[in-house]
Image (cartoon, helix red, strand yellow):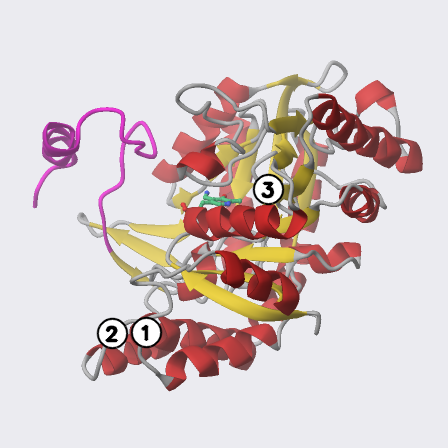
Amino acid sequence: MTSVQTLVERRERLLGPGNPLFYDDPVHLVRGEGVWLHDADNNRFLDCYNNVPCVGHCHPRVVKALCEQASQLNTHTRYLHENILDYAERLLAKFDASLDRVALACTGSEANDLALRIARVNSGGEGFICTNATYHGNTTAVAQLSSIFEPIGGYGEHIRMVRWPDSYRPIGGLAGDALADAYVDEIKAAIESLERSGLRLAGMIACPIFANEGLPDVPRGYMEKAIACVRDAGGLFIADEVQSGFGRTGQWWGHEQSGVVPDIVTLGKPMGAGHPISGVVARGALLDNYRRHEMYFNTFGGNPVSCAVALAVIDVIDDEDLVANAAAIGRYVLDGFTELQAKHELIGDVRGRGLFFGIELVNDRETREPAAERARTIVNAMRHKGVLMSKIGEHDNVLKLRPPLCFSRDNADFLLATLDEVLAAV
Ligand code: PMP
């Protein structure tokens, strides 16, 4: 079997250095099934990280749908085909009735790029707001709205970043409505700042659960007020559901929790359970008006194979009741993490929605000093004990877990016991 070191060297020679690779001791995966991944040496890992294979790795129904359509026909959306229509119907039925049109693409970045264009055309503005600890993708336009990696050439005059609604280190030590209002004031200030520069607001883009920011307990009322404030200024609210969508939060969409309906929703990652398909769902009038201004065509987006796969993903989520599973097992895991918090000083805060968790590690519970180095140590130690996870957050100290939606109670017990052991050792 090819050794890990040989693969790492070959990778560097062919792809160049600087390609992100997980873990100090990288993992060479060769097979996946359900929540389990297997490496070339036949070691088994519990996947607590990958939200893309949302229905479980290599789900037989998804694989079958892919193989069957791939053996029949694969073209693009300039020919008529039922698959895209069947898929569009099934997908749109999962949204509020006002969100009644969809455009398909291949990646989350493309979906967000298209959403920005739709917002520009419909608002007549060009200014965009995002948070100060986020990532929305890698096209030139979208990279402008990603604070985690600064774009080449820096940020444009049309971008304003606002503080994300941090609940663990709240601004001004505020709480409740006052905290929500303080964060909304940031958005108001950003809009005023754009206006002072002679720029009108086109929109705000945010993940409804602020996953990349560190998965805060979003202050109640924040989303509603943020969206109202953006709309009052003539802008559109784009909910980036690339991570939070498709049942991850124990509801179909992350924005459902807030009770307000975004103008545009972008989708990706779990949509094809590993097959590259993404989408923009919007109010019909917005997408129709955009299409009067610009011809958007995506060669691979919405092809018959992608749509067959994506349809199978929705079927499996529905038939296996995975949204309810995410809610139920999610609560069980969160309770388990809360018990670990009582036992291990290192855990400053535990947060989660459905099967998406953030465990904030701190060196001192009083000062809340982020424990980024120990977060890194734990992620690597868990990998050696057969559990895959990662870390996120503005301070890089939040353990990030989002297993496939078919995660079971037994899986949860294994995760909790292993984490307990590793925390005790650290
Ligand atoms: N939006 C969010 C919230 C993301 O987390 C990501 C990727 N991590 C993207 C968009 C970009 O998706 P993709 O990598 O498929 O382009």
The answer to whether mark 3 is within 8 Å of ligand 1 is yes
Residue picked out by circle 2? 75
Look at the numbered discs 3 and 1 and tell me whether their residues touch, using CB distance below 8 Å.
no
| Quadrant housing residue 251 | bottom right
Q: Which residues are magenta?
A: 1-30
Q: Is residue 244 magenta?
A: no
Residue picked out by circle 3? 211
Residue 38 seen in the figure: yes
Q: Position of residue 21 (x, y in %)?
A: 30, 33
Q: Position of residue 418 (x, y in %)?
A: 49, 42
Instruction: Give the spatial CA distance, label 2 vs label 3.
Output: 35 Å
The label nearer to you, 1 versus 2, is 1
Q: Is residue 5 magenta?
A: yes
Look at the numbered discs 1 and 2 and tell me whether their residues touch, using CB distance below 8 Å.
yes
Q: Which mark is residue 78?
A: 1
Going by the numbered disc 2, the residue's amino acid type is: Thr
